Amino acid sequence: MDITSGLAHIDYIAMVILFAVGLYIVLTRQNLLKKILGLNIMETSVFGLIVTSGMVDGGSPPLLGRGLEAPYASPVTHALVLTGIVVALSVTALALVLIVRVKRECGSIELDELLEPEE
Amino acid sequence: MRRVLALAVVLVLAALMMAGVNQLPPPGQADQPVHRHVAADYVAGGAQAGGAGNLVTSVLLHYRALDTYGEVVVIFAALLGVLLVRSTGGPPTRPPSRLVPVSPVVDQVVRLMTPFIALFALFMIVEGHVLPGGGFQGGVVLGALMILLSLILGPERLRGLLPIGAVTWVRAAAPLVFLLCALAGLGLAGWWFALPDPGWLREFVLVALELAIGFGAAAALTGFFLSLAVDGHH
């Protein structure tokens, strides 16, 4: 692999790094809120990867009848990511409210404290 | 120890994914698979078949309308879950926190900007099939406006804006209108979410769907925020 082919994928590689950062946060942090933040970072990296794959260098947004010239960016990836963002938002909201509930019931949102057996 | 293990797992996975993405066609070129198969068809025929110059809206509300239906059901289910978790359960652990007094500058600016933000949100929703924007985007702007207003006026005044019964219907608007349009398509043209033929009727259906998505998303966002921000029951 020569250097130019490596640089051609630099957008994808950046998203892989972002995904790794998010996964590391999810795996190592004990705070439930931070786990959700890590999950959101992972989601963002996936959205970035998909949207990047649909881009065209020097292309137009996929709007017809506005005097924009082909090539257009792929509308499919945009629609996919729009759906993904909405689902990610729903997951985050539900997780946050469950964390509020855990805090209220158990008094903590640190996973290691929650998992300790009560005496 | 645990961190070292996690780091090792993450690094191995990242290396695998790096090797994977390096085999993908590089982004940014128009002759790739992602631009060739369905995407090319959508660009060629999307404006005609979907009745929308904005091809993203065309994909969302025509080609993949069933997926978008699932999406609005997901956000509605999440809203139901949030409201359910917040409305059941023990007493609040602390008395409801008092609102911090808002700076008069912030208060005046938000009041001044409110009609313009609302107009912009509405514009994004109803013009979402021909211009950048759409139901979800406009709905998020509208929801952000509602959250701003609840910070300025307080959640109680915000709740007074709409009667309780109407709030329920607005929250359920998106799944209900989608179901109606799906059945209308089934009845008129013979398949789910078929768009009716005359151009004006097609546009009417699209705008109705966008409006339902927009107000549904705004109601969901506001519901999420109020459920999380206001301690105790409501």
Image (tube, grey):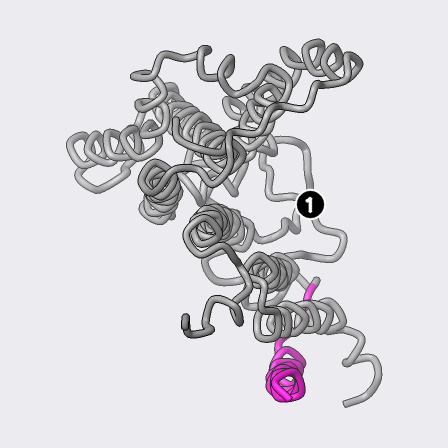
Instruction: Tell me the amino acid under the disc marked 1.
Output: Ser
Helix, strand or loop at mark 1:
loop
- The residue lying toward the viewer, choosing from A45 and B179, is A45
Q: Which residue is drawn at 40% across and 39% down?
A: B61
Residue B142's x, y, as percent?
55, 25
Residue A54's x, y, as percent?
61, 58
Residue A51 location, quadrant: bottom right
Residue B6: within the magenta?
Answer: yes
- The residue lying toward the viewer, choosing from B77 and B121, is B77
Marker count (numbered) = 1
Farthest right residue in view: A3
Residue B124 location, quadrant: top right
Drawn side of residue B14 relative to residue B85, left or right: right
Quadrant where the C terminus of chain B sits is: top left
- The residue lying toward the viewer, choosing from B25 and B4, is B4
Q: Main secondary structure of the magenta part?
A: helix
The crowding category of the residue bearing disc 1, from other C-alpha atoms within 10 Å (few below 14, some 14 to 19, many at least 20), is some
The answer to whether residue B42 is above or below residue B234 is below
Residue A59 seen anywhere in this rendered image of the structure = yes
Q: Which residue is drawn at 23% across and 41% down?
A: B192
**In which chain is the residue bearing label 1?**
A
Q: Residue at x 52, y 29 (%)?
A: B96
Quadrant where the N terminus of chain B sits is: bottom right
Residue B4: within the magenta?
Answer: yes
Question: Which residue position is annotated with label 1?
Answer: A60
The answer to whether residue B127 is above or below residue B35 is above
From which residue to which does the magenta span run? Answer: B1-27
Residue B129 seen anywhere in this rendered image of the structure = no
Residue B75's x, y, as percent?
40, 42
